[in-house]
Image (cartoon, helix red, strand yellow):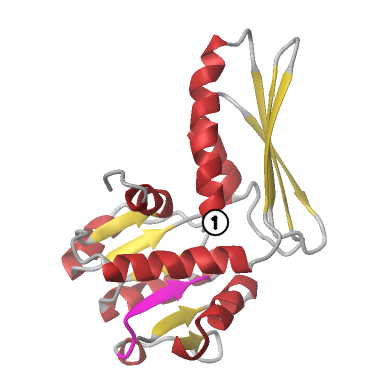
Amino acid sequence: MKIAVIGTGKTGSAVGQLLGESAVLFDGSNPASVSALSDVSAAIVFVPPDAVESVIETVLEAGIPAVWGTTGYKWPPSLPARVQEKGVKWVIGSNFSLGMNLARKAINMFGNGSKLLKEPEFHIHEVHHIHKKDAPSGTALSWQEWLDEESSISSDRQGDVKGIHTLHIKTENESIWLKHEAHSRKLFAEGAVWAARYMLKHSDIEPGVYSFSSVFDRAFGEEL
């Protein structure tokens, strides 16, 4: 089974290395085409936001399942209907760490449980490599959404940091911290490949656009 890897930046390259001989690589010098994608079972896309427009129509026209790791891009409202019309399944995520989704469960709990605390304050801090274009990170924005409480976000860009996210809940008398740190981009590559193979394996999943977190939940026995 061949899987297209569109975008050979740091994370895309890690995906290609993980897939090995089953990877078909595309980048700016070798752009994906509808005919080329006809030979693959699915696509994994890690391109920057400004490159999405040049790729999205090609992947749609090819009519293949796709996993998208682009952050900082505003997806068009019409996308879910168009993907459904093509009869395919897309997974979109800001962070493909399976461990991050365990953190999501904890953040949900903290958000709900914090209602018992007296005047809690919430702050999310994220650190990434100096070449990351979007700030705050898509993951930090997801943490804010998962928390579902008024919270501030700060960002820092340092060296080649793969991703550090910290939640601080503070009251007058105590602090609670939750931290997730990625040690290698292989983490995100593993999650993206897992998502692609999961969607291909489960033919009972209806065509449409799904978040990575919803696929994670389904795999752990919760309804998609």
Left or right, 188 with respect to 22, comes to right
Name of the residue lying farthest toward the top: 118
Residue 29, horizontal then vertical, whole percent: 56, 91
Residue 144, horizontal then vertical, whole percent: 55, 35
Q: Along the line of sight, which residue is nearer the eye, 14 or 88?
A: 14
**Quadrant (top left, top right, bottom left, bottom right) of the N terminus:** bottom left
What number of labels is visible? 1
Residue occupying image coordinates x 50% and y 81%: 19
Residue occupying image coordinates x 63% and y 7%: 118
- Residue 63 found in image quarter: bottom left
Q: Along the line of sight, which residue is nearer the eye, 105 or 64?
A: 105
Residue 187 is covered by the magenta coloring: no
- Residue 92 found in image quarter: bottom left
Residue 68, horizontal then vertical, whole percent: 44, 65
Amino acid under disc 1: Ser
User: Label 1 crowding class (10 Å Cα cut-off): few <14, some 14-19, many 20+?
Assistant: many
Residue 70, horizontal then vertical, whole percent: 51, 63
| Residue 87 seen in this snapshot | yes
Q: Along the line of sight, which residue is nearer the eye, 131 or 201?
A: 201
- Residue 171 found in image quarter: top right
Q: Is residue 219 above or below residue 142?
A: below
Magenta residues span 39-46
Q: Is residue 35 above or below residue 126?
A: below
Residue occupying image coordinates x 54% and y 33%: 107
Identify the element where label 1 is drawn: loop
Q: Along the line of sight, which residue is nearer the eye, 26 or 51?
A: 26
| Residue 148 seen in this snapshot | no
Q: Is residue 192 above or below residue 14?
A: above
Name of the residue lying farthest toward the front: 221
The residue at which mark 1 appears reads as 97
Left or right, 106 with respect to 124, comes to left
